[in-house]
Amino acid sequence: MRTSANWINQYLSSPATAQEQAEVLTSVGFPCESSESIAGGDTAQEVETTSNRGDCLCHLGLAREIAAATSRTIRLPSTAAIRSSERASVAIKVENHEPSRCPRYTARVVRGVKIAPSPQWLRDRLIAIGQTPRNNVVDCTNFLLFEYGQPTHVFDLATLRGGTIHVRSAVAGETFLPLGEGSKAITLDGNELVIADCERPIALAGVKGGALTAVTDSTRDIVIESAAFDPVAVRRTARSTRISSDSSYRFERGVHPADVDDAAERLLSLILETAGGSALEGSVVGGPPLPTTRIVELRLAKLSSIAGYSISSDEVIRILTELGFSPRLSGQVVGCTIPPRRIDVTREIDLIEEVVRLAGLDRIPMNDRISVRPIGSQSAVMAVRSAKNCLAGLGFVETVSPTLISERAASAFVRDAITTLRIEDERALGEPILRPSLLSSLLQSLKLNRDRGNRDVRLFEHATTFWLASQGHCERRMLGMVVGEAGDAESLYRLVRGSVECVARELCGVHARFDVRTIAGLDIEFVGASALSPAGHFMIDDQAVGVLGLVNSDALAAAGVDGPIAAAELDWERLAIGYPPTPGATALANSPSLDRDLSVVFAESVTWAQVESTVRSAELPHLESIVFVGNWRGKGIGAGRKSVTFRMDFRSDRTLRREEIDPHIARLVGVLASELQGEIRS
């Protein structure tokens, strides 16, 4: 914001040099970026303000900061205005149709003004900050904007049609002619908030006034608008119409409804002083009741604890008084009435920041030494690191992909009871959908690699997915992986399953039990299952933690890739719940093991989990482990059947002989035949 040093001094009990103003404002968080001498012995300075301090986008707000930081007092300008007996409500009416976007709209009427050049003092103030003087009435509105920070507007009462001001949404297709030399009419799309008379828009609310109701040399009666508008509504209108102004800049940073009337009274007194006329009694108001005043308490002990040093209660009261917080000391607690303009102050810590900032940040003690107590890495962090290291060791490459995907990429995951979440933002362009599954992003990354000649890739990602179900918005951290290298479907599936088991073993330990069970019917818990066929639940100790399988044709088509591709998607919270696994110690064997391989023909529907469970339930003496070796389908087996080969290891505290194991193997063959209809392969 461009400021005038002389203008700021107008509100201080004693003047401050331009250099002092720059140093003080910089020290309290408003850096002075440049300074230049201008006519009249004045100095213009550029002061940077933060987005949450709209109250300092004016000379009075900056003067408050200087007064509070330098033990000066603030001098407020006069707002007294003499009224006539005629009431404003007779001359104009206000209908506020959008109270949520316009929490307060006020109209005041002045009759008999004389439009003329502004007095020299007013012209000098505006010229000092780079504004161009127009006439006494318009210049008063600009002066008020940079004095109070309240945007206002003035209409020529004679040009208003119907005698009523309407605050409403624009009608799609209606036109509006903004103020400004050479300006052209624009067509509104219906989302803008406008100020209108009974026939047409006369202003874009909070953004720009209209040329058709502007003050001219022939104007005699005026309507003063002072209002508060929703920052989002103002910003949306400014962007859609590509019109911005000092007023819209201020409204976008927040104007409290309770500040509207004081600023309007100040403007009224300025217009009567510079343009004459007679102010009608009262104002016409549209909008809901004003919000209640906020009371926030500050504990002096808490202040000292946060600041690191003691600040006297007298100094605290002085600072808060100059900032307009009306402090009241009761024991060791200061009760503060928050002025409406300070929309950034809502908690005790906000008041502490104000006091420490204005007491001087340089007073905060600096410790030469900092005591540090190192702690070990959090288990949640280590779990992610372990899983990633495991997958990297298996040849997988980590991807970091955008959260947003296209409609087409999301189409494979939309089904009954599951819908996608869309963001309404023009920056999303053709990818407005929050991904419901990591598989959509991984398939896109796979396609990108294939397009660039990288055919044999294994990809994984650890990120969040989003979707909408019957219970509402769902958000879940997942671990996804895809394998798109050369190979048949079975080998790719086995590779993914083995990779999933390696990660699960790393996170859950050697004692966890793993299994894959066929998904029966619609799975509404794991969205990624929609893209897999055949698909199965990956189970850890009989709890489903995710899905794995082959990517189906619909998902392949949506991603624009060809198969076969194997994939898995796991719920991270369930997968890592057992991390870190409990370590165990086992004595090393002192005798050799004896292994036996069996090849048994089963029906295609029999799973390895069933075979393993049946073998273990047979309780073979000395059985140490059972390991899957492979499947065989084809000649000599028969349709709908498969040969499963597995290896069993036996061990005792002495050397075992085959003759000791053979009777138990024969018994196992009988068990497999009776329970699973298995036949020893000849």
Image: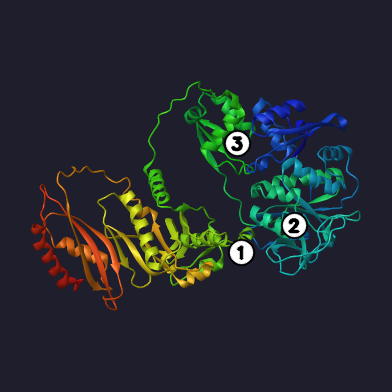
Q: Is residue 346 among the parts visible in the rendering?
A: yes
**Which residue has dot 1 on it?**
430
Instruction: Compute the Cα span from label 3 to label 2.
Output: 38 Å
Q: Are marks 1 and 3 in contact (CB under 8 Å)?
A: no
The figure's colour scheme reads: rainbow
Instruction: Compute the Cα span from label 1 to label 3.
Output: 49 Å
Vertical comparison of 302 with 597: above or below? above
Q: Which amino acid does label 3 sit on?
A: Phe
Badge nearest the viewer, 3 or 2: 2
Task: Give how far across and how far down residue 142 sits, in percent.
Answer: 79, 45
- Pick the quarter of the image with the N terminus: top right
User: Closest to the observer: 472 or 547?
Assistant: 547
**Which residue has dot 2 on it?**
242
Q: Is residue 256 toward the left or the right of residue 675 in the image?
A: right
| Residue found at x 11% / y 59% | 661
**Which residue has dot 3 on it?**
325
* 1 or 3: tag closer to the N-terminus: 3
Vertical comparison of 486 with 253: above or below? below
Disc 3 secondary structure class: loop
Badge nearest the viewer, 1 or 3: 1
Instruction: Compute the Cα span from label 1 to label 2.
Output: 23 Å
Task: Give how far across and how far down residue 4 sits, in percent.
Answer: 79, 34
